[in-house]
Each structure stands twice: as C-alpha cells, then as structure tokens.
Image (cartoon, rainbow, N blue to C red):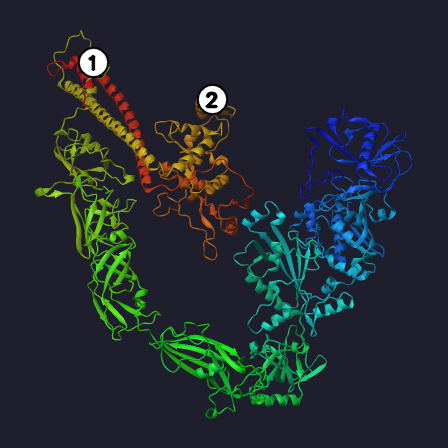
Amino acid sequence: MSFMEEEVPLPRGKKRLFADISGHNELGAIYKFKILLPNSTTVGLTLHEHTLSNLQMSVQEFIGLVRTEYFRNHLQIESPDKRQKIMWKSKDLYIEDISEKRMYHSIDLRNFQPHKCHILQLNDGSGQSADTFKDMWDLTPDTDLLAELPEEYTFETALADLIDNSLQAVWSNGIRERRLISVDLVEDRISIFDSGPGMDASDENSIVKWGKMGASLHRPSKAHAIGGKPPYLKPFFGMFGYGGPIASMHLGRRALVSSKTKESKKVYTLHLEREALLSGSGSGLTWRTAGGIRNPSEEETAKSPHGSFTKVEIFEPKIRSLNVFQVQCKLKDIYFPYIQCDEVCNTGKTRTPVEFQVNGLNLININGGEVGTTNFHSSNGPEFVLQLHFSRNQDNAATKSPGLRSSQEANARLKCVYFPIVEGKENLETILEKLEAEGCKTNENYDSFSRVSIRRLGRLLPDARWSLPFMQYKLRKGDKGQLLKRCFKRVKCFIDTDAGFNPTPSKTDLAHHNPFTRALKDFGNKPPEHWREISVEIRRGGNLLTLSQLEKVYQDWIYQMHDLYDEEIDSGEDQPVIVVGSLDKKKLGISSDVVRVHEIIRRKGKSWKRGQKIKILKGACPGCHKNNIFATLEYILLEGFQGDTGGEARLICRPLSIPDEDGSILAVDVGTASFDCHGSLSLPISVIDAGKCLAVESSEWHLQLEKQRQKSPSVIDILCERQCLELEVDGALPIDAPVYAGHVPPKEIVAVLRPACFVSSSASKNLDEKYIIKGSRDSKKLDQKYIVKDNLELYMEVKFMDDMKNGKHIYSINVTSSSRNGFHGLYIFPLGHKFPGLFQKAGLYTFTVFLKDSHLESCKKTVLVKPLPKVSSWRFSSDAQNTVYSVRAGSCLAPFSIAFYDSFENQIPLASIPEFIIKINSNGRILVRSDKMNVELSSDNLTLRVEEVLIESSDLDKIRPSYAATLMIYPQDELPPISVACEVNPGPLEHAIAQPPLSDSQLLPGCVIEELVLEMFDAYGNHAKEGLEVEFNLHGFCFQDHNGLNHKCDCKYNHPAVDDRGCIDLSGLLRVTAGYGKNGINNITLGEFSLSVLSVNKVIFKQELQTQKRELRAASIVPHSCAAGSQLENIVFEIVNSEGEVDETVHDEEKHGKIHTLRIIYDSSDSDGSVRFAFRNGRCIIPTIPLPQKQGDFTFLAVHSCHPELSLTIKVSLVEVPQVKQEDFELRYPNENMLLLQDSPTPRHVDNDLVELLMNDEKEIEDDIYKIGLFIGENERKLTLLYKQKGDIEPSIEKLQASAEYDSLNSHQDYMSNKESVMECIEKKDKSAAAFFCNLSRKIPFQDPGSQLMKDIVGVVALLGTVHIDPLGRLLAEYLGEDQMLAVVCRSYEVASKLEKYELDGKVDHEHALYAVAKSYGRPINDRFFVICLENIRPYTEGFKDNDPQRKLNIPNPILPTGEVPPGFLGYAVNMVELEPDHLHTRTTTGQGLRETLFYCLFGELQVYQTREDMKKACFYTRHGAVSLDGGIMKGNGVISFGYREPQISFPVATPESPKRVRILEMIEEKRTSLRMVHDEIGQLNKVVNKAKKKLHRKISRSRKLLDRFGPYMRGSYLEYHTNNTANDSLENWPK
C-alpha cells in the first residue's frame, strides 16, 4: 500500500492489506491522489476505473470530486482551528502536479500509474499559498512494533540512532558524490545533515518511511551485510524501523525533517511534535502529521553539490548545556572506522570513508576519546587476529528460521592487542589516567577495565563491555603461571561483527538472547552436549583451529608480546651479580636462564635493601592468601641482561618461620655465580606496586618472634569417646576390641595439637582448653599465652590391610582448626559422612594424623574388623571368574575353586563340605548334568577345590559355532546357583559321512567331483568344530583350486579345515587322476582309486572307487595288405564305453583343460609319435599313415596321449607292385589323342605291355574315385555328428539361461529394472546407432552366431558393465560423456568398416550398410556415433588380481610420501565397474577380456575418492585423473570439471552376482564358445566336401574318356571291357 493512501485503520494486531502490484483487479484500475489545498489542508481522493465513464475528465469535474471529499471529511472531523476558505467557484482554478505542470482544462488519468498515490496541488486564484499542510503524512505504525520500542535512551544513544540513518544513506552515494554527515549542536537546536540520496513522495523512497515506525528503508539490506571482509563496513543498521522518530522525540519536543532527491526539484518536509504523537497514540487512532514542499536553500546546495540530502532538525532540546568536546570524542569512538580506517585501503594509507563534522569540525582532527587513546598506547607488535564463522546446525536452522540467511550464519573478527608495562607502569593505567584528564573518565580501574570492545558493522556498541572465556586466565602450573596471569590482563580484544549478530533495540549491546551472541560470549568454553545449536569455525591466518589449539597459540602470542615489549624494571642501585644457568626457575618464578642479583633497588620512590624486614599483606600474591607474612628481604632478581625486554623482577624473602641457614644462598666461585632459593619465597615485584609490601619496624619484628616461639606445637592427639561426648561430637574410634563387618564408623574424628608446655604425665583426663592450640579468636576461659593464631593444617590418612597382608590407601584429608561447643583449635576430620561403609571389609584399619613438614611425631590408631559368621553368597575364585572354561566332549573340566562370603563380600571359612550339582546350560537348554566329581577343602578352610568333572553331550550342534555355554553349580541349601562362562567343544573325530555318497558310475579320468561334502563327527555325534584340520590320503585323486590348477599329487597328505557347518566341502576340489578302467593283465582291474580321511593317525573314513571303462578301436576298415610305399588314408579311431557306444564327451579342448589327442607310434625308429591328432566327439581321423617301401609286415600303435591305457596295435602286410614306365606308353602311342574307328578291324594281337598299361591307368582312376568317395562319406558323417552336436548344445544353452534367470529372479529384480530403464533411455535417443542396436537386441541378442549383423557386435558401452551404487554410475557416465556411453563395441576394425559405406565424393551413403538395415527396421540413423574395436585396443598387460572372478586389474594403489594410501581412496574406476554377467567371458582372438581392453581404454587408471577434499589432497598422485562421489572431476593434465550435470545415460546399478549364477554364466559362455567352434567346423567341412565332389566329377569324366578311346583294345583276350555303367556304379555306390 502506498504510504499516502487513506483508509480506515485495521484492528490491532492485524496486517494491512496490499493492493495488486499490477495495478488492476477484477473491477479495473484504482487511481489515488493526495491534493494539497490552499488553506494548508490535504484531502485524499480514490477513483475506481469501473465507476468512470471515461479516463479523461475535465478539471472542473475533478475539482468537484475533491470538493465533495473535502466537505465529507470536514464534517466528520471537527477541527478547532479556523482555516481560510477555499474559492471553489473561482474561474482561475487549476491543478498543478509535483513537476509544476499545470492543468487548466482536463486531466487524463492514463498519465498516472494505478495504485500509486500522486500529489497534486489545487490553486484557487486567491494568491494564497502554503508550505506546510496539516495531516499530510500518515505515520501510523504497525501495532505489533510498539512492543519492540527501547526502554530507555541516553542522549548519545539517541543522537547515534539519527546518525545511523545518515550513515546508511551516504554509504550508497557514488564514487564522485560527497559523503558528508554534519552535526550541529547549539543551545536551542540540534541538526543532523547528510548528503545521502534523500527522500521524496514516491512509494519506493517515501519520506513517510523515515517517520513511520516499522517502515525502515534499510531493513531488507541486512542480509547483504553478512559476510565480507572485516571490519564489515556495511552500515545497514536498520533493524526495527523506529530509530528516527523515537530518537528525535527523545532529544527534543519538535522535529523537522527535510529531504530532497537528485530527481526532484522540491524539498519535502515532515513535521513531528511529541505531544501530538502521544495524544494520537492508541489502538483506535492514527498518527498523522503535517508536511510540506519547498525549494532547497543555498547552504543545503553547497553541502551537497550532487543535489540530494536529508536534514533532521530538533527544536527545544531536552539538554541545554553540552560539552561539545566530549560529544565529539564519543561520536568518534562510535564511528571510528568510518572516520578513519587503515584496513579498507589497499595502499596502506589511512582512508576517510565518510566526512564527519560536529559543529563544523572534522572528527578526524579530534585527538581524544577512548578508541584513539587506546590505539596510541598499544604495542606495535603483531596482533592476534581470529576469524570466527558462526552457523546454526542444520536441524535447528530448519526449524527456527527457514530460508533466512540472516538467521543462519554470522561472522566476527577478534583482534587482540597487547598493552605492555613500560618502566614498571601498566599502559592500561596510563590510558585511564589520560581519559580522566580529558573529561572522559570511566568508573573502571585497571582490574575492572573492560578488555573487550565490540563493533557491529563498524559501529561501536558502548554497553558491550563483557569478557570472553578464551581471554581469561586459566590456572596453569609451571614456572610461568603467574607471569601468564599478569600478561593476560594486558590484552584487549576488539571484535568486529557483521549483520548476522542482532543488537539490542537501543543498539548499545548485542541482543542477549540471540544464539550467536550467547555463542560469542561463551567463546573459549566447550559447549555442553545438550546445547549444540551453534557451530563455530575458528581460523587464524586461514588455518582452522580447535579450542585446544587456540589456547596454545594464544598463550604463545602472549609470551611473544611479553618478551618483545614488557619492561618491568631496568636495573638496581648496586652492581649486580650475573647468574647464568643452574637456576630453579619453577621455584623462582622466572623463565630466563640469566638473572641479575641485586641487593638494593628503588621502587615507588623508596629504596628496598637486603636484610630489610618486611610484611607481605594477606592476598598480595599466590601463596599469601591466608595470613600476613613477616619476612626478611634477601635479594632482588632481574631476568636477562640489562636492556633486555620482557624480564621479570622478583623479591627473594625469607619468612620469619624459616631459619637463616635455610634461606637463599648466592655463591660466587672463581668468577662463576650460582643462586639457590632454598626455603625462601620468590614474590613478584608487583606486590610493592600494589602497596601489599610494607617495611616493618624492629619492635614489631621482635614481637612476632616471641609469638612464633610460643606457638610451637608438641604432641598430636586423637580424642577418645569420653572427650568427644564432652564436645557433643560423634567421633570415637572402636580401638578397644575387634568389631564385626558393617560396624557404623564415627561421623567425625577429632584431633588436637598439644603445646610445648604440655606434660603428658600431668595432663588432665578432662578436656582443658588451655592445652589446646587454636587458630581463631581467644576464649574467655583461655589464657592468651596458650593460643596460637596461626591456622595450621593437620593431615589424616586411613589405610587398610586384609588377611593377605595387602595394604590399601583408603582416604586422606587435610583440615584447618575449627570451633565446637565453645572450644577452639579442634581439627575435625569427616569420616562417617564420606565413608558410611568404611568398616564393611574385614581387616586392620590404621588412622594416622600428622603435621606436614614438621618434626612432630604422628599419631596412629588401629581398628580390627572381623567378617560376619553367616554365609550370604558363594562364587568362583577370582581366577576362575575371569576365565572362560574350554572343554571337549568326552574330557574333564579343568579344576576350579569356590569361595564363600558374608553380606559384605568378606570371605568366610567353612566348617564342612557342602553338596551341589553341576550343570552346563545354553539358552535354557541343559547340555550336561553331573553330580560325580572330586571335592576337597583347602587347608585354611576358605575355598573348595572341584576336580574330575566328566563332560558328555550329543547336543553341541545346537550351540555351534561359538559353543558358548554357562557352567552352573546348584547348592542343596537356600543359596542361589553360581555360574561362569564356558565353551564346550566337540570331541576328537570319530567318523565321517560323504554327502552325497560317492559313486563310480559317473567318474571319468580328469573329471572334477562337483559336489562332495564330508560331514565330520565326534564319538557323541556332534559335528566337528570349525577350523579343525584333518589329513587326507588320496590315491587316484588330486586337489585343485577353483581355477583348475592342481596343487597336490597322489599319495600326498593334505590338511583341509572343517567349515562352520562341521563339514569339509570338497566340491570342485577333487580331480580324478586315475586312468580309464579296463581289464588288465591277469584279470587285474585298472582305474581303481581311493579317498581316505585320517585324524590323529586314525582312519575315520575310506572309500574305494573305480573309473568307467573305455576302449580305443578303429572305426574304419584297415586292409590286411597294401602296396609297399603307399599310404593308409582317413583311418578313423573311436573311444567306446563298455556297451560299445562312442563316448562323445571325449573332445579336445585344450584351453578348457580337456586334452584328448591320439599319437601314432611306428615300429620303425624314424618316428617318435610326437604328432598328435585331436579327438572330436569321441572320434579321431588320421588323414594319412605312410607305409614303408619294403614288403613284409608293418605294425603301428595308436595310443591316447594322456591315457596310455587307451591303445590299439594294427598290423598290415605290404606287397611289392610292378610299375609301368610312362615313356613306354608314349613311344608306342605317341599320339594319345588318336581315335580308333569302330568299324576298323580289331587287331588280332595287342601288345601285352600296352594292355597292362591301360588297365593300370584305369585301376588308378578307380582307386582315386574310391578314395575321394570314402573321404566325402567320412566328412559327411562328421557333418552329421556336428549337426547333432549343434542340436544338443543349443537346448542346453536355453536350459542354462532359464536356470540363470530363475536363480536371479529375486536378487536381480532391481538390477533388471534398472537395466531396462537404461535401455529405454538409450532407445529414446532417436536416430542414433546405440538406440537401433539396443532395440534390435530385444529380438536378436548381441553376439548371436546365427545373425550376420549381430554376431560380432559386443554391445553398447552403457550396457556392458554395472556399478554397486548409483552416484558412482552417474559420475562415471558424466566423466565419459554421452558419446562414449553410447559407443557401439565390436570385435575388430574389419567388422566396423562394414557398418558404413561412402559415396564417390566421400559423403556417407545412407542407403547401404548399417543405415539401410536400420531404416528397414523403422529406426533410421542420422547422427554421428562412436565404434570401439576390441581387437585394435592395446590391452593392460600387468596381470590381474588373484582368484578374482571379475578379473580385476592388478593396478598398485597410489602411495603418499608417508607410505600410506591417500585418505578417502576407494579404488580405480576400471575395477569398480562390474562386467555385465553375459560378458564375463567375452574374449578377443588373443584371449583378452573387456576389462583390460574396453574399460581400460575408457578409464585408464582413473582414481575414485570419497570427497572432493580427499581428491584435492591426492591430486599430485593421480596419473589419469580422479573423481569423487560428491561430484568432483579432475581429468588430468590440469583439466578440472566444475558445475553439475545430470547424465541421462548411466551405468545400471546391480548387486554382486551369486557364485551359483556366475558358474552358470561361465557354463553358458563355454557352451556358446563350443557352438561357435561347431559352426566354424561345419562351414569348413562343407567347403571341403564341395571341393572333393568337384574333384570326383573330374575323375569320373576322365575315366569315361579313357574307356571311350581305348575300350576296344582292352576287350581282347587279355582283359574285359568295362562299360560306362561300371563308372556310374563306382560314383553312386562308394562307401558313405
């Protein structure tokens, strides 16, 4: 609401309504005006758009509305004063706005902004005008603020409040604008002028806000004044919004506020009158005051050349006579950093931020005031500066002031300044004296002078004169304790705070209940646990400090300043003796190794000499707080050499009670001086300055000597029962006879000192006070000569000794003398109140009373206490009570002892052996019950010894694995049972059971027993204890780890340990090393093997087994005879089982550890059988076996390379075949193309050689055709087997996949959901290759061997790995960037090059390759994408971590120079990405996995840390960059990523795979590898078969041509002619 809007006041306590900022509501715009009338009155006018027919009206119509409103208000308010009449009907009426624009005819409302009040002036042509207008301004405050008004003001406080407004105003001036605050104090007027921006009538800068409480212009600026650089010169003091009116009305009866802005031509005025405001204050009234408009004066224009100012004039001030100089000094103290400041200027020169004038004198020229005087007398040394940051704890901040920075944090700078002592006089005393001389005297002295001065935003808070705990001296032991105490008083702390601290309403102190104020006041104390609302961060020089560190560095600074500047005293009046080293500095109270020893000094105008008798008054210094001390001055010690600063001066005095020989000694031997204090005292010289050291006359000294002699004590005595009754004291010790335990001790013990004249033989048994030395006022019944006024201290010690002669100190105390029942000098020691159960333990109690450091003999009394006769409890002996008994089933418990006690835990002797039962329980279950044992009583009858308790139980499995139980002993009487912790372990191993039972039906050589668990039992049927090692005797077995590596050979002992189930799990650990079973020589069965388990050389388990029988046979027919020099081709060998079936599991897979090859060993010496032929699905094909050139029998051996029992011997007879020379054929028939006509006569005789040659040629062709056919048939049989193998593998893969999905259904539900969401995000990346492949993978899996497109595509980077936590997945995705997260991974560059084709001009061809395929699927690709080729990546070659199924890389951890791993280091990113289960065994052609290729290429050795701070500390030890879980990214080579980005694509989050699922996935990968190998073999065999068929057709064609040409020559008598059908038969009927 505009400040000029007239409305009915709201009810008390409610907020005022604000109009819509836009200026419109449902009824249209609202236009508001304040019209200044010629008769010095005002009237408000509000026009609503919906009531107007036109926004442009005539002036007469507008004046008519004004007139109506004026008379309506005039009738409602009866004004007592008679004002001039207004000429409403004058022809010269016109309206004038604030810019002096006159309107005679019409007013256009569209030129005025809606919902803002505009000032217009009515001129009626009468020539009358006014500068002041009644009720022009509405100063009605918000009623809620009235409760916040300050209770009391002083003149300086009120004046400072007005200056605060001026300072806030001028601070916003520009660089070239004058910042002036001018205060004029005269008898009848007080004026405050400032050259600030000024005020006008606008809503934003209204002059009303100056006078209206709660309408502060600067309150919103408070948040801008939090933080920054000390001394926080941001004068946004506005807090409550009533400083102006309240302060001005406190200073005087009337106030006139004049203000002008640079934009306005006029000066706006506001009038305040105290009586008018007071009469108008009430819940139902409003505060309205007069105002006006005028032109600026020449003086105002001269003071503010830029044209804006504010002037507050106060008339009829309350204070008539002022000391202007004192006001100037106080104002300079309050605004000192604004007047002159050395900190805000970079040049180091003193700067004057604001020009302050008081009565025309610039305050910078004023030499006076507390601040200036204090600064002048401070030391020039380094200041102790702390920077404090206060913040609300998160939980408190959220509940108290949500969203307000001003209530969440605050800052303060503490600058401690040292004021040294110079020439024996404290500088702070000098400051107080000078302030008193200047008329600025305070009520403080040196001790009470405030050591803290606080400024808020550079403004002094004069009443904030409290102390800080961290500056207060804490009792410190050591040689510098007293020095430190004095130096602490020489420090004053100047505190600068920002706007985070709230002031009191009067701005004289910090708000007391504000939590930041409380935290500052308590700074130095550790906050209690229940109040941790505020956290304080302490820094000095940028370094963070704890409270303990702060205390140390502060004391170090105190010592430094003392050494640099303090000047206690320079020298004495005699020649000193210099002593170097060999000083008891602690006793002397000095810190230097050098002292000057004087015998005379001058201090306080008097001379003090060696031998002078002095009196040190009580309380002068530590050690003198009880009585006055009479002593002899011996020496004066000055620390350091002459001219050194910081040295202490000490008085060495020998007290009256110390003899001369025990005084201090100064010895000089051959130029070397030494000093020993002995029994003398070392007092600071400040006792002279404080007037606490006085010279003593000889008469007084002799009087003290006589008193000292008379006070000499002689005997210490403890009063008996009768004497205590006379004193009415319960203080008698039972020393006459023994007492039972529980006897009530006396409440007090009374001891007295007997004087030297006391004679024990003549002492009265009654208490005579003249024989008691007392230390208080004398009694009427006592003679003064028997009274010693010194208050001595007696000490009492109470010791205890039990029956075992073990001594123990119970109690010690020292007391001074006191009075009781008229007697004085009583030393009463409290006993029963402090130790009501003192006599509960049986034994001997000794009470010793003595006087420390005295020749008096101590007084001793003893009391004997016996145990009670009744038994109250029993328990194990102390050794057994602290021992956990461990016993095995079948053995006896270790012996233990039991003792019996009374109600006070005193051990009681037994008269007989009691009866009891022993049980062992666990969780309410009885495991053992026994009443058979051997019990004996000890020689002293104090303990029972229990032995030979047999433990038998078959229920120990119920308490495994801890086997923890409780040993309980139950007595026969009413005593409760006792117990002790025990551990009942199973007994020695007795037998074992195999689960599942071993069977030899499925055992093959080299196979691993996948599931075998041996349950181990003791004789009682309890499972064996975890960790128990047993011995294994293996025959035909060997141990291997989970990686398939053998560790032990046959017949070796192994020592596996029992697990937590009481079993030994051998699953996957035993490999069969025995060969295949078969009947050997003499019917001995081969392949037998056994497994034995031994415990303590005893066989507890043995099982004998046998492998399955296998036999090697030739599947193809081997001819009985062959031509010498020829060869056997395509000989097929098979391994069959006992039923004659081929064992297809015999398949050579070397990389999986399955080696099945066949060796051929000839009987000739030229072959060693080193060539091996692989078995495929139980069969092995030998392509060729060369035969020797000589005829005769030829024998060779076919044997399995790993299983020699699988062997076969083959014998072939070799015959010599005659050979026909080719040249014979060519000579006889030179033209082989010659045709013999069918109709020509057949020769009667054909050359036998020619016929034989033709027949041999035909026979060779037929043999070739047969061999090729045999080769084709064999390969087609192989193809059949491969297709069968393919048909077996594919269903098994599907079965394993179903099993894996079932196994991970629950544990991986969240992971699949997460992965699915990642895939959906990828698919949303339209027109990208990753989206296409991701979508296609839902139909055709990646690396599907049946798909030409997908078989060599590994996947998309984002889907190939998982992480365990979401922040890591998002952080790594942000590190890689979206392009690399969506990169397509393929096997080789050859595959990648097929994904894209190019046109002749080099542009991408979008109609071929991958683009065409994607378009056919309805997902066209139109964006650049990355492809990563695994085969072309240089892998990591430094190995892997041991036994890690994820094959994590063996990268060494980073190491700091200290040899430690950097704090917060979590690991390497390449190892923190878990491979997606389907890709655990994805390999390149060289056997490399995805981690050492793909992910090492992407991340390198990127390090992962917990926080940014951890990452920054280790930045010099990162090779490839680092990231932190809170968002930090360093990419190496000086590249740092700032800001924050939420990646759309990140790695899925998954929990670790179960071992079972990992094994299933490994089997799936193995099956897929086998399937790929089968596919490859099928393809290769198809090529070989097709090539062989082509060769066969060529042979058949040649045979036909030969028969066609030479058939007639071969039909003669020598041979038959074979028709074409023979050839056809040979083609169609060869062996398959």
Q: Quadrant of the C terminus?
A: top left
Residue 212 position, x and y percent, is 74, 45
Q: Is residue 267 visible?
A: no
Q: CA distance from mark 2 to mark 1?
A: 58 Å
Total labels: the figure holds 2
Q: Residue at x 24, y 28 (%)?
A: 1281
Q: Nearer the viewer, mark 2 or mark 1?
A: 2
Q: x, y (%) of residue 1384?
A: 44, 33
Horizontal arrangement in the rendering, residue 127 relative to residue 106 (left or right) = right
Question: Who is closer to the viewer here, 835 or 311?
Answer: 835
Checking the image for residue 593, the label placed there is none
Three-letter amino acid code of the residue under disc 2: Glu
The quadrant in which the N terminus is found is top right
Q: Specify the amino acid type for callout 1.
A: Arg
- The correct choice, above or below, for 1451 with respect to 1109 in the image is below
- Residues at marks 2 and 1 touching, judged by CB atoms closer than 8 Å: no
Question: Residue 1605 — which label?
Answer: 1
Q: Give the farthest residue toward the left.
A: 1082
Q: Tag on residue 1407?
A: 2
Determine whether 695 is above or below 358 in the image: below
Circle 1 sits in a helix, a strand or a loop, which is it? helix
Crowd around label 2: few <14 · some 14–19 · many ≥20 (10 Å): some
Classify residue 395 as left or right of residue 1114.
Answer: right
**Residue at (34%, 34%) from the top-left corner?**
1301
**Image-quadrant location for residue 647:** bottom right
